Image (cartoon, rainbow, N blue to C red):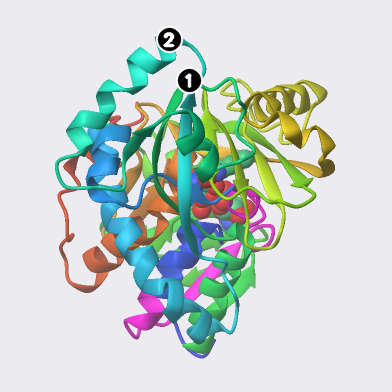
Amino acid sequence: MAGKPDVVVVGAGVMGCSAAYWLSKEGYKVLTLEKEAVAAGASGMSAAHWLAVGRSAREVLQDGWLTELGWLSCKLHQELACVLPQESGIDIGYREHPAIQPAFSMEEVESLKPQLSASKRDDPSVRWLEGQALWEVEPRLNRHVLGGLAYRQAQVLAYQFVLALVEAAERRGMELRHGKVVGLLGSDGQVTGVQLRHGETVATETVVLAMGPWSQRAEAWLGLKVPVYPVRGQLLELRVPDPQLQASLSYNDMYLVHKADGTTLAGATYEPDSGFADRPTAAGLEAVMNAALQMAPSLEEAQVASHISGLRPASGDALPLIGPIPGWQGVYMVSGHDRHGMELSLISTRIVTDLIVKGHSPVPIEMFDPARFGSME
Ligand SMILES: Cc1cc2nc3c(=O)[nH]c(=O)nc-3n(C[C@H](O)[C@H](O)[C@H](O)COP(=O)(O)OP(=O)(O)OC[C@H]3O[C@@H](n4cnc5c(N)ncnc54)[C@H](O)[C@@H]3O)c2cc1C
């Protein structure tokens, strides 16, 4: 890259790459530094589907903080569904399809069914279905189901989505380089650059830290507590003989979703004690397969094509960290999205981009303040 980058993005997961995408689109000269490879972490392993695309469905199915952010991000995903493949030449596999949350016991019916009435207000896509009506939406659904919430859902192909963001940004001049950032340089509270592992420095006045589960490593640089820790998730890629699943199914935090590349993903474990151990395990395989067969017993005939895992970046209070770093003029963080990073990537990095370009966020972000955990003593 000729001359000093306007912005250095640290990390080429979905957060770093979508930040680079938006910033390049705004005409900024961006350098993205990645210690491994594009989407080498959770971003390349993700199931990359998210809850209801209808607004009120989200209100029913999600906690409050996620509702608005998720809704805004879904709108951005819908907008980019056509634009990004044109800008990058890469098919990102965006799809909207039915989704079912089944109940197999009366207790589950009693907990799920009340969620319906609140959603009926303005979204006809959320319904309570039983028996034949459910099997018409998804013929492979377990016949022991008592009922289920049905709504609309969206998905992309995770790896292709991140690659498309990179390609589109590169076509606008973004540079992607291999390099591990080990510190920040600054003067009078203003960031002046980043320090790389082998002593090299890169000068810049703006840095976006998008380091996923490795974000805590920045505590020493920033003087702030950054309680972001890795949570392993394991997924199975299944090859299912026809007919393919028409709806995605989710039960007890596990799910089955048919993807645009023809595979069916069964996932995912949630292992908060995994540390940075990112290899799949026999116990993970068993847990995922048991849940998949509970939802759709006929998948017994499916082949297990691969067993993969990734480390989600979870935060100490289950909220993401999005925004400027106090005491470091020009430094921003976008991290801690746990299970929702694919879904929330576009809005979270749009916020950071607007903070850099316009000086303000399009939505309130106080609750996501990266400094909320206090400073290091
Ligand atoms: C099995 C599984 C299923 C999932 N399913 C979904 C889903 O259906 N929907 C959804 O919305 N989300 C899902 N997620 C969550 C989603 O994948 C994550 O929230 C998201 O990928 C996090 O992106 P990130 O960019 O913050 O982190 P990462 O993908 O981890 O990227 C961070 C990058 O920063 C790099 N890096 C770190 N430190 C440095 C440094 N010092 N210098 C240079 N580079 C550095 C890393 O090498 C890495 O490439 C799933 C996750 C898993 C594991």
The image quarter containing residue 205 is bottom left
| Position of residue 79 measured from the top left corner of the image (x, y, whole percent) | 35, 72
The relative height of residue 85 versus residue 297 in the rendered view (above or below) is: below
- Observer-nearest of 330 and 145: 145
Instruction: Report the amino acid beneath label 2.
Output: Met
Q: Is residue 132 in view?
A: yes
Residue bearing mark 2: 106
Left-right relation of 333 to 146 = left
- The span picked out in magenta is 22-46
At horizontal 34% and vertical 13% (from top left) the residue drawn is 110
The relative height of residue 219 versus residue 25 in the rendered view (above or below) is: above
Q: Is residue 330 in view?
A: no
Cα–Cα gap, marks 1 and 2: 8 Å
The image quarter containing residue 208 is bottom left
Q: Is residue 220 magenta?
A: no
Left-right relation of 240 to 75 = right
Residue bearing mark 1: 146
| Position of residue 241 measured from the top left corner of the image (x, y, whole percent) | 80, 49
Instruction: Report the amino acid beneath label 1.
Output: Leu
